[in-house]
Structures are given as C-alpha cells and as structure tokens.
Image (tube, helix red, strand yellow):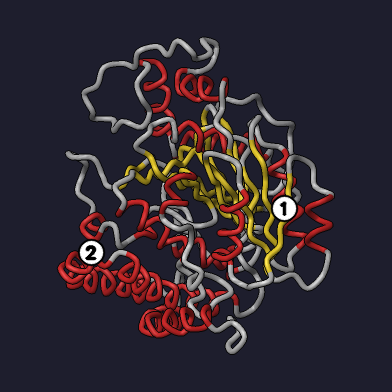
Amino acid sequence: MVIDPKQAPIQVAQVDMDAPDSPPANLARATSVLALVRMHGHPLGVIGTRLPAGSDLPTGLRTAACTQLGSQLAEHARRDWTGRDRRQPPTAAAAPLDPDPGADPAAPPCLRARAAVLADPPAVSVIIATRGRPRQLARALASLAALDYSRYEVLVVDNEPDGDATRLAAEHADGPVRYLRTRRRGVARAHNLGVLEATGSILAFTDDDVTVDRSWLAAIAETFADPQVGCVTGLIMPGELETPQQAMLERRGGYGKGFAAKVFPAPPGSPPDPGERLFPFTAGRMGSGANMAFDARLLRELGGFDPALGPGTPARAGEDLLALFRAAAAGRQVVYQPDALVWHHHRREPGALEAQALGYGIGLGAYLTSALVHEPRMLPAFLRLLPDGVRYALRNASKDQDDAAAWPRRLAALERRGLIRGPAAYAHSRWAARHPATVRSR
C-alpha cells in the first residue's frame, strides 16, 4: 500500500484474523488507518483503509483485510492444512513436515516448532543502549516485561549519562532488568559493554524508541534453532504515524523488510533479486539495529561492534550494518524473520528527516569504509561489484525523483552528500576514538 503523508495523522493498528473479536470501538471521526494483519500471530501484510465516523474499528479492519490480503490469508491457511513449512515458497515441491515429538499437538501447525523451542528456551540477553530518554526507555521496558518468554535478561546501558533519570527508569521497571553505564559516548561502545556483561547464548538488540511484540524473543529463539544461523533480524513496524514527517519516512520504506522470511545469502534456486548481486555489502537489506540478534559466541569472535561507527560518533550510523556484514562474511546465515516484530516510534520533531537523511548517508559511507578495514580480503569483491553498486544507487536516486512526495529531492541530495562524506567521517571517528581527551565524539 502507498502511504500519503498528507493524510497524517494515520492511526496504526493490528488485527489477528484468528483471534476472538475485539470489543466494539466506534470511531468518533473519519480515520485513516494503517493496520498489520496477522494470523496465529504471524504478520502477513499491512492494509490501508479510511473508515467513516461511527465505524466499528475491528470489523472494518477485518473486512479490509479480507479484501486486500485475501490471497495471503488463504495461503497461510493452506500451509497449516497441509502441515508445510510456512517459510518455503508457495511453488516449492516439498513434502509435509514430520511431526515434532516435542511440539504441543494442540498448537496450530505453524506454531508447533516454536512451542517445542519454548519448552526448553535458550537464554537471551536483550541489550538497549540509551541516553537521556527515560520516558521512551520506560515504554520499551514495559513491553519487554510483557514478553511471552521465560528465560531472558535486559541490560540497559546508559551512554554518557548526565543524571539519574535513566537509572531510575531501569530500576523501577518490571522484569529482569540490569542497569549499566559507560562514560564514553557512542552506541557501539554501549553495545560492547552489554556484550561483555551479557550471560545469554543469544544477544538481542533493540532501541529505547521501540516497543516489542510479546512473541519477539520466541520468534528469534525459534530461528536460532538452526545451528547455521549466526544472526536474526526482524520486522519493524511504525509505532505511530501522527505527523507528515513520520508518514514520509514510512512511505520511503521505513525500517521493515517485508513479510516473507529471507535467508542471506539466498539459497540456490531462489528467484533473482537485483540486490543479491551486491551481497554482502548491501547489509541494510538484511535488517536494522533496532531489531537484530546474534549468536553470542559469533559476535564476540568478531570483536563486537566497531566503536568508530554509529550514533554518538562523527560517523553517525552504520555499526549495525557492519555487524550484519561481518556475520555474513564469516560464513554464517543471516535470517530475516518477520515474526520477530517490533514497533518503532519514528522521530517527529522539526528537522528530524533532514538530520536522518544526512546521518544515513554518512553512516553508509562510513560502514563501507569500515567493512574494508575489518575485512580487507573483501576488497577484490568490492571493486568487482562497484559498477553494479553505482547503478543500484542511481536507480534508487531516480525513484526519489519520481516520487517527491515520498522523499523530497533535498533529502535524497543530503543522503548522497553524506555518502561522499562517509569515508572521511570514519577516519575522523577512528582518530577521535584513539584521542578521546583531544576530540570529543559528536
């Protein structure tokens, strides 16, 4: 669906087609709605509709879901009926799955593998880097306390704190929360402290402006049941679309990567994808730092996150991209699992899009530079793919020009300008990391 920023505010909702009907919620006014549609908890797609005043919201959403996503709903029901793996493409000639002896026979077929994992779940450490946003942090921690998972801890890493508000938010939160602090600014540094202190065999990362779905960790743990998997990323939905800026960012592509599970690198025989030619340098196609998890041993073997990348440094972003890139370069699978769902509250203050566009561009250029610094053996592949990469970037730029409502030209220009500045920003950031008393990271 196409989001029109002019329709903001847009109400964000969700509807599970297999769940009991929600209580009536008659709308006081005509409302534009963006809704996530689920079955048995699995996200199947989004719908957009405008409901008139007096409409019952749950009924209107179910009707719109059947109209707009009828084929997806029917396909999910068919896979459950035949007992097939929902991650296989519809055209795959595969036999039904063998019953899992550890699975709950009362669970829907699509949830039996997860039920078996939850019977003896692996330990997960959730790491949140934060600085000066106690209200957002409290909201994120409240969602983590409601997780449908029995074996996890939450590590809140206060990044260069200037008061006690963050510590108090962590201490007053429900659930297994530990508070840590670091005096050196930078999200990557905060993450590395969390990696050092974490006890789980899986390390999950999210942000303080995110709320997580109840099944977030269950979906991550289910995916890690395959020992070839080194990293799992997940679906990121907008938590709100109250302003045109938030709607514009979501129309541009937001943070989500679709509703089909994907494995990187793609298995042999998969449909061709132009972005796959640039793998693993197009790390942003694999996921985002607001919703990613790593095998703890792998991440520690890779040395954690590059402290010269990410928010709080001159490089501004890219620490998540490098971690995804290095996991793939190490020969481990990166799996995008849409069932691992979180809700991101996009920035809404004036000037946020401009700062975000420039920061993304700088971070991308810095990440690519860092990738070659950490994995010099990838330089020949990078040079071989460079012409395709330029064409890919130009194609995306032309989309920006064709759809100015989604991403105005000034924002696209800021991204390109940032990309050019990225290598120098990374060099500056590395120098600043070695001379903290001389140059303070921004």
- Foreground residue, 34 or 116? 116
Pointer 1 or 2: first along the chain: 1
Is 208 drawn above or below residue 86 in the view shown? below
| Badge number at residue 7 | none
Q: Which is more foreground, mark 1 or mark 2?
A: 2
Q: Residue at x 52, y 49 (%)?
A: 48
> Quadrant of the rendered structure where residue 341 is?
top right
Residue 326 position, x and y percent, is 36, 57
| Residue receiving disc 2 | 377
- In which quadrant is the C terminus drawn? bottom right
- Classify 10 Å Cα crowding around label 2: few (below 14), some (14-19), many (20 and above): few
**Amino acid on which the number 1 mark rests in the picture:** Arg
Marks 1 and 2 close (CB-CB < 8 Å) = no
Is 55 drawn above or below residue 116 in the view shown? below
Residue 391 position, x and y percent, is 21, 71
Q: Residue at x 23, y 30 (%)?
A: 91
- Classify 10 Å Cα crowding around label 1: few (below 14), some (14-19), many (20 and above): few
| Residue receiving disc 1 | 29
Is 262 drawn above or below residue 401 in the view shown? above
- Foreground residue, 4 or 123? 123
Give the farthest residue toward the left.
384
Direction from residue 203 to residue 421 in the image, left or right: left
> Quadrant of the rendered structure where residue 246 is?
bottom right
